[in-house]
Image (tube, helix red, strand yellow):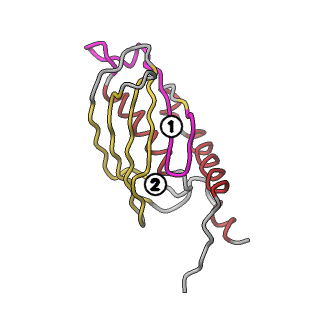
């Protein structure tokens, strides 16, 4: 017989998403080093920003695609881990649509399209501050064992 757990309220789900983002950010040295900022994380969604610095441009003096990918991948990570279940990427694809330039601030918005069992699909749009779309990213997620905040789910279900 399976144990039934009531679905969390919207407020509980948001509290969990916030706590999970805070815990992840404390350990996310790569995102911190790239100067990313979390604007918001909601269940299945995330919005992060990153200013394009001089050390992020390539030989064409535009933002290196790897930097744009890193921002998109990080937004994807925060959205798919927002339920406090350890989740990693199983596949990603990005289409670069327009260049980003030094001094511009990019925002990456990740939105869950599907989540079932251990897998999920997330779409991330990377835009400039004025709304120009720079890249479209699709990430496929896979839930592994454990929690972002260890013991939180166990403590919540044992009450």
**Based on the displayed image, in which of its 4 quarters is residue 65 positioned?**
top left
In the picture, the quarter occupied by the C terminus is: bottom right
Is 54 a magenta residue? yes
Q: Position of residue 136 (x, y in %)?
A: 32, 37
Dot 2 lies on which element? Answer: strand
Question: Which label lies toward us, 2 or 1?
Answer: 1
Q: Which residue is identified by label 2?
A: 87
Residue 53 against residue 134 in the figure, above or below = above
**Based on the displayed image, in which of its 4 quarters is residue 24 positioned?**
top right
Residue 29 against residue 62 in the figure, above or below = below
Query: Is 47 placed left or right of 156 in the picture?
Result: left
Which residue is at a point 50% across and 34% down the rendered structure image? 48
Which residue is at a point 32% across and 23% down the rendered structure image? 64
Residue 100 against residue 90 in the figure, above or below = above
Q: Which stretch is magenta? A: 38-63
Viewer-proximal residue, 75 or 146?
A: 75
Q: Which residue is identified by label 1?
A: 47
- Residue extending furthest front? 131
Viewer-proximal residue, 52 or 112?
A: 112
Residue 105's label in the rendered image is none
Dot 1 lies on which element? Answer: strand
């Amino acid at each position: 017989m399976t144990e039934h757990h009531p679905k969390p309220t919207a407020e509980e789900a948001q509290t969990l998403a916030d706590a999970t983002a805070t815990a992840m950010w404390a350990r996310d040295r790569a995102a911190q080093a790239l100067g990313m900022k979390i604007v918001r994380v909601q269940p299945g969604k995330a919005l992060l920003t990153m200013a394009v610095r001089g050390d992020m441009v390539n030989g064409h003096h535009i933002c290196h695609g790897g930097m744009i990918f890193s921002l998109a991948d990080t937004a994807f990570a925060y959205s798919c881990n927002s339920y406090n279940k350890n989740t990693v990427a199983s596949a990603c694809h990005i289409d670069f649509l327009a260049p980003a330039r030094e001094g511009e601030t990019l925002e990456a918005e990740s939105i869950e399209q599907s989540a079932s069992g251990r897998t999920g699909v997330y779409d991330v749009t990377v835009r400039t501050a004025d709304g120009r779309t720079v890249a479209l990213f699709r990430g496929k997620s896979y839930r592994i064992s454990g929690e972002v905040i260890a013991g939180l789910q166990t403590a919540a279900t044992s009450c």
